[in-house]
Image: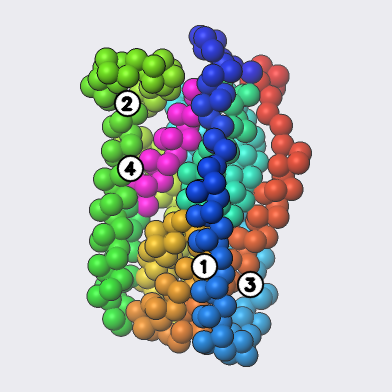
Amino acid sequence: MTTAGEDDPDAELAATVPARPSRFRLAFRLAVTVAGAALLVVLIRGVGIDELRGVLTPALPWLPLIAGLEAVRIGCDALASRLALGPRGRAVPLRTYYVAQVIAHAVMNVFPAGRSASEAVKATLLTPALGGAPAAAMGYSNQANILISSAAFTVLCLLGALASPEPQLLVIGLVAHSTVLAASGIGMRFAATSSVVAERTARHWPWLWRRVSRFHDVSRETPLISPKPIAVMFLGRSVQTAEYGVIAWAVGIDVGVLEALAVQGTNLVAAAVGVFVPGQLGSAEAVFAAAAAVLGTTVARAMSIALLAHAVQLAWVVVGFGALLVFRTRHPTDD
């Protein structure tokens, strides 16, 4: 159900639904998935199954705590989604955002470019309650806000990198990561809210403007840099840092605050390197293995961080797709 003032709800809904991928995209997705899986097999064989088993088996009792921290991080993303729309976001209960976020989180861990795919799915799920344009604006703003918040948190991770035994490569990666993410996030928000961009779009591409004008109007209801959702996403990264700190401790690495920040910095770089690999399966293990010296540990322990994180992600994928079977949205007036 759409909100008042939306002239063409069907068109708006269509704008939020991901288009069917082309054959090239399907082939590309299959190729990167196979490549990631093959890389993982090579890495496991290189390190040795017995050595990895010796590291991972004592860590298994920590899985419930790690999964619980992931639940809190998902909650931060859900709250940030609500805040991304300003007062308009309060029309839908937070529990609805949370369930939609759980589903989107599952999508993020099985699709290439997972964040974009997850926001598209979440926007589609929430369209009946929010309306097409607000849901699309929420998804787009979330992508921008996560880039901005991650850029800011990456700066914090630099403290951990600088305190590590061999910081050079990680520091370079984090500086590049923060710069690109900040520029991308601010650029996305500028494109969505700028009156100059809107005027030029309306003048040169009127057919496009007719489709995005409502989206633009909703996007302008919140500031270019929205402090509340960005702060909540920053908090989510803090929870994720604690989560990866627990994982590192579980696999036998001595971890303090700075060490946890270095582990999280490695995770952020791994996410960027493997952005097109579903769930970063294989690519994350490769980055952590390469960062073993930076983290002051063995390759087996460093790689086990990514393996244990993937085990938790798999559990949340099952939960997310299970939630999809029972998910429904209601118009705010139904509550």
Which is nearer the eye, 271 or 67?
A: 271
Front label number (4 vs 1): 1
Q: Give the residue pinned by disc 1.
A: 35
Residue type of the residue flagged with mark 2: Thr
Q: Amino acid at mark 4?
A: Gly
Image position of 32 (left or right of 287): right
Q: Secondary structure at mark 3?
A: helix
Residue 2 placement, left or right of 208: right
Q: Could you tell me which residue is drawn at 64 percent across and 45 percent down? A: 103
Q: Which residues are magenta?
A: 133-150
Where does label 2 land, which residue?
A: 193
First in sequence: mark 3 vs mark 1: 1
Number of marks drawn: 4
Which residue is disc 4 drawn over? 185
Q: CA distance from mark 4 to mark 3?
A: 35 Å
Q: For the view shown, which residue lies furthest in the front direction?
A: 23
Q: Earlier in the sequence, mark 1 or mark 2?
A: 1
